[in-house]
Image (cartoon, grey):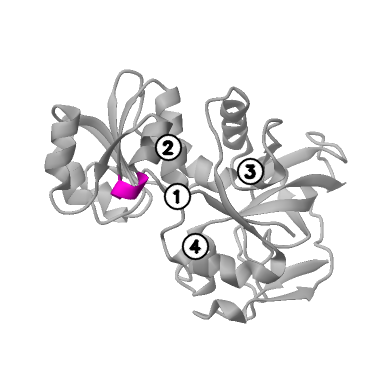
Amino acid sequence: MRAAVYDAYTENFDDITVRDLPDPKLPPASVLIEVKAAGVNPVDWKLVGGHLDAFMPTQFPVTPGWDVAGVVVGLGFDTPEFSIGDEVIAYARKDVLSTGTFAEKVAVPVRAVAAKPKSLSWEQAGALPLAGGTALRTLNSLGALEGRTVLIHGAAGGVGGFAVQIARAAGARVIGTASEANHDYLRGLGAEPVTYGEGLAERVLAAAGGKVDGVADFVGGVLDDTLAVLAEDGSHASVADPTVAEHGGRYIWVRPDGDETARLGLLVDEGKLSVDIAQTYGLDEVPQAFKDSATGHVRGKLVIVP
């Protein structure tokens, strides 16, 4: 099979090349997926540079990619949950960084796999699991949302856009931070936009008419603003700042969870969650996809299509 590969940690994305590799081995309780699409996430290119080496063991050569949508083409022993030909999605992170989803095939533990939402294209489905799961797990950590006011830092980003929709579907009022260029986009998702930067806390308090009940941080560096606008009995969580745990918040690191991914699919098929695709790339364009993602100015998801 063809796969994108790098042989050592590097800050030069052009070191990622496409080569022929053996088909993945298929462990028990796993499925072999023919990859139709695989979403690009910031963690993918951060891993290439070794930025998570302190706690992610690595076995080179590495194929990047943790999102996948595709068709089941092989079943490991004792895997009654799926059949050959099933259309599926997964957040396919493994305990060792080695065999990822930017390839023609990938083996994934069945515990991480869910049925593909029927209403999504392959590209949209491949972009959903990690970013959508991050949004869902972060919001779940805030407790019941119905009737509450929630601030979302980075609301126009890949994760933030999902979070706005999920929070609105749960009955929350959402205030979202973004650049002015993305304010109309946030309004379209049902959020009340405020501009990030100096004076943010004052703008949030004015927009909310007081303090907010919950805060979801998808950008980092905003803890002081979070604490300034959060009600005394409010809750907050961050995917970007581990120090929130020292201030009564929760740091989120998303685990592969097929049941959680299935809940995202249900929201999609109920018309409560949409997936915005910014651009697609072939396997040989993975370096460019990483360069585009690293700019931090992409609205919507980038997707690799083998």
Tell me the element at label 4: helix
Q: Which mark is residue 293?
A: 4
Which amino acid lies under the numbered mark 2 shown in the image of this protein?
Ala
Q: Earlier in the sequence, mark 2 or mark 4?
A: 2
Query: Mark 2, residues whose alpha carbon is within 10 Å: few (<14), some, or many (≥20)?
Result: many
Looking at the rendered structure, the secondary structure element under dot 3 is helix
Q: Earlier in the sequence, mark 4 or mark 1?
A: 1
Q: Position of residue 295 (x, y in %)?
A: 43, 65
| Measured Cα–Cα span from mark 4 to mark 3 | 17 Å
In the rendered image of this protein, does residue 142 appear above or below residue 202? above
Picture layout, residue 112 above or below residue 187: below
Local SS, label 2: helix
Kind of residue sitting beneath label 3: Gln
Amino acid, disc 4? Ser
Calculate the distance from the C-alpha at mark 2 to the C-alpha at mark 4: 19 Å
In the rendered image, the vertical position of residue 94 relative to residue 290, given as above or below: above
Label 4 and label 1: CA atoms lie apart by 20 Å
- Residue that mark 2 sits on: 163
- Label 4 neighbourhood size at 10 Å, few (<14), some (14-19), many (20+)? some
> Label 1, on which residue?
253
The residue at which mark 3 appears reads as 124
